Amino acid sequence: MADTMRAAVYKDVRDIHIEEVPVPRCGPTDAIVRMTTTSICGTDSHIWRGEYPVAQGRIVGHEPVGVIHEVGEAVYGYEPGDRVVVAAITPCGTCYFCQSGDASQCAGYEDRWGIIGGWRLGNSADGVQADYFRVPYAQANLARIPEGLSDESVLFVTDIATTGLAAVETAGVQFGDSVVIFAQGPIGLCATAGARLRGAGLVIAVDANERRLEFAKRMGADVVIDYTQEDPVAKVKALTEGRGADVAIEALGIQETFENCLKAVRPAGMVSSLGVYGDKISIPLEAFIYGIGDIDIRSTLCPGGKKRLTSLMNLVKTGRLNLSQLITHRYSLDDIEEAYHLFSNQEDGVVKIAVTP
């Protein structure tokens, strides 16, 4: 193997481009994986636009499928050549947060907590939009891909699927509940699928993009609302006997959708927030029922670890979760600058992009 590789490197605002960089070294608890398919996430777009800070020179990306190239001496049960997925969140399994059941906020063996939690790849450590990437705490984070599943069929279990489904789990959706999901981007679409899988009785998807509303129907929405054509809050109230939805999911990360969730949820309901916010948000007084409406607001950082990924791949294998249909565009790693521009500006009807070496 060569000593250098291609990688998408963050240099400045709206400047992520391919550079030749050293191949990562494998520590005793690490694995080195050769990337075979990856993608661009909405959070990567926040980084590209300068709305979320990462260090200059950071290799970006956190949605990888690949083949193990090397494993550290402390990692057992895996061999070079194994096809694997690795989640955006890479918990160590032993720190205070992991042992408390909050692995997404993993502090690592060093037990140093930070606001970024367990999101290392493409954030606090180099990411996966490269020929090779390093997996920290590999024993806990390598998940073998079942026979017969393609890269594209499992690519999104690494982030958007585990995140979207987690919004529904965090909200405690019960059989028969009414759930409204504001914004049908990739994570919102996965939240829509999660609401259906969880047994919601009424799944309502809100967006203005006709293509994404069509995708929402495929992912399990019973009703779709184009918010440019009708008031989504009024429509949700009309569909729920005037009460509001049992659960409202915010999947974009802006003030407008956050407020609409508060307005559309019933008293004593749950607002489940998924969006990565690029600016300050405020809680409107009346929508929050002056603080006495028993409304819960919960945020979610996507669960990681091999058990979580294996569970989601089982849903894919049995046909209960179709994620590959979200791929609308394909690019090579060398053309990732063009892919960033298209995805971040939501051009040409893009939903998700598959990037291969």
Image (cartoon, rainbow, N blue to C red):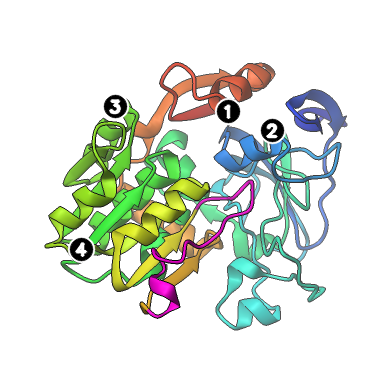
Q: Secondary structure at mark 4?
A: loop
Q: What separation in Å lies between label 1 and label 3 (alpha carbons)? A: 18 Å
Residue type, numbered disc 2:
Arg
- Labelled pair 2, 1 in contact (Cβ < 8 Å): yes
Q: Position of residue 316 (x, y in %)?
A: 33, 48
Residue under label 1? 344
Q: Is residue 31 above or below residue 352?
A: below
Q: Position of residue 46 (x, y in %)?
A: 64, 39
Residue under label 2? 49
First to last magenta residue range:
275-292
Q: What separation in Å lies between label 4 and label 2 (alpha carbons)? A: 37 Å
Residue under label 4? 199
Q: Secondary structure at mark 3?
A: helix
Q: Secondary structure at mark 2?
A: loop
Residue under label 3? 210
- Location of the C terminus by quadrant is top right
